[in-house]
Image (cartoon, rainbow, N blue to C red):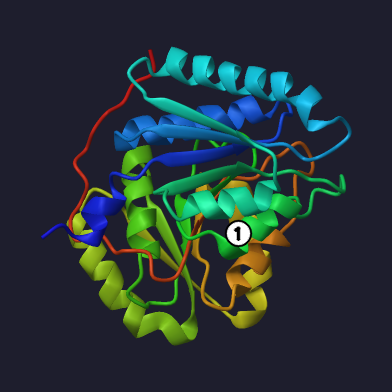
């Protein structure tokens, strides 16, 4: 019988692009994820409905998707890349695609210029994505651990952090409130045994320190991993953390939805090197 996890491992990586020059960077990130996983990449561009008509926008949209294909396959020649140009809202399109993807990748877009928030599309998708969502917020810091906000429950959040840390060759910092101590200890023991080369630190915080800790982790870590939770409080905490200030960019965020399959084995170490 085929397990849910093995089916998930074959699902494509989907990336949304909105036409801005910086979106080519998010295609790079998504292409690397797809190549590492050994799955296809699908690039989606949704026409925003303004300021030009659909017929006038189609050539520009197709050109953007062609550039995305060339860029991805230049870095990873064997990568299979598909595209879709749609005449509908970006948020709804990406959520629909998330139901048939193993990972959804979007770009942080500070629409207000304040450095806070991700933009309306990313914020909506963060609350509704069926699969894990990777929010690209600029170049990841070259050093530091993978930080993961955990509750100790048996979810895919913690193994996702261990897998990312193993891939990056760094450690995991597990951040939790005091009430999760015993449950988290058991979970860390389990996943540390599966990834023995990944060093682990624990950071115990109070409820009042959550926002401050997320903000610091976003500035100092390579990746911030959090479970979305059924109420979405972690999404709001990460969304409202400080933005790019003082020339320091924030690390990517990986949000894992509730119910996402927990892996029953450690993925094979597959090195994927861009051409």
Asked whether, in this view, residue 244 is left or right of residue 130, the answer is right
Residue 105 percent across, percent down from the top left: 54, 43
Q: Is residue 147 above or below residue 220?
A: below
Determine the residue located farthest toward the bottom in the rendered image.
179
SS for dot 1? helix
* Quadrant, the C terminus: top left
- Residue under numbered circle 1: 126
Find residue 174 and report its image quarter: bottom left
Residue 39 percent across, percent down from the top left: 33, 35
In the rendered image, is residue 133 in sight?
no
Query: Which residue is at 38% across, 39% downward?
Result: 168
Determine the residue located farthest toward the left in the rendered image.
1
Q: Nearer the viewer, residue 115 or 35?
A: 35
Q: Nearer the viewer, residue 198 or 2?
A: 2
* Quadrant, the N terminus: bottom left
Find residue 240 and report its image quarter: bottom right
Circle count: 1
Q: Is residue 5 above or below residue 272?
A: below
Asked whether, in this view, residue 193 is left or right of residue 107, the answer is left
Query: Which residue is at 20% across, 53% downward?
Result: 196
Give the crowd class for mark 1: few <14, some 14-19, many >=20 residues within 10 Å.
many
Query: Which residue is at 80% across, 23% downward?
Result: 56
Residue 236 percent across, percent down from the top left: 67, 67
Q: Nearer the viewer, residue 170 or 231?
A: 231
Q: Nearer the viewer, residue 34 or 197?
A: 34
Query: Which residue is at 31% across, 76% downward?
Result: 185
Residue 198 percent across, percent down from the top left: 29, 50
In the rendered image, is residue 163 in sight?
yes
């Amino acid at each position: 019988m085929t397990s849910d996890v093995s089916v998930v491992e074959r699902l494509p990586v989907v990336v949304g692009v909105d036409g801005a020059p910086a979106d080519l960077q998010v295609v790079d990130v998504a292409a690397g994820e797809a190549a590492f996983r050994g799955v296809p990449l699908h690039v989606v561009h949704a026409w925003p409905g303004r300021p030009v008509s659909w017929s006038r926008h189609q050539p520009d949209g197709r050109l953007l998707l062609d550039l995305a294909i060339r860029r991805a396959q230049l870095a990873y020649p064997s990568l299979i890349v598909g595209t879709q140009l749609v005449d509908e809202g970006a948020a709804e399109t990406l959520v629909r695609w998330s139901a048939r993807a193993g990972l959804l990748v979007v770009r942080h877009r500070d629409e207000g210029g304040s450095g806070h928030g991700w933009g309306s599309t990313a914020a909506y998708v963060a609350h509704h994505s069926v699969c894990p969502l990777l929010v690209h917020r600029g170049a990841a810091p070259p050093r530091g651990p993978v930080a993961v906000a955990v509750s100790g429950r048996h979810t895919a959040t913690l193994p996702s952090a261990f897998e990312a840390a193993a891939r990056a060759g760094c450690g995991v910092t597990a951040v939790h409130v005091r009430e999760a101590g015993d449950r988290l200890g058991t979970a860390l023991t389990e996943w540390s045994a599966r990834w023995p080369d990944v060093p682990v630190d624990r950071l115990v915080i109070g409820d009042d320190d959550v926002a401050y800790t997320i903000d610091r982790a976003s500035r100092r870590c390579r990746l911030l991993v959090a479970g979305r939770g059924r109420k979405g409080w972690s999404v709001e905490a990460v969304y409202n953390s400080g933005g790019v200030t003082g020339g320091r960019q924030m690390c990517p965020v990986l949000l894992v939805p509730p119910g996402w399959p927990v892996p029953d084995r450690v993925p094979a170490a597959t090195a994927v090197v861009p051409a």
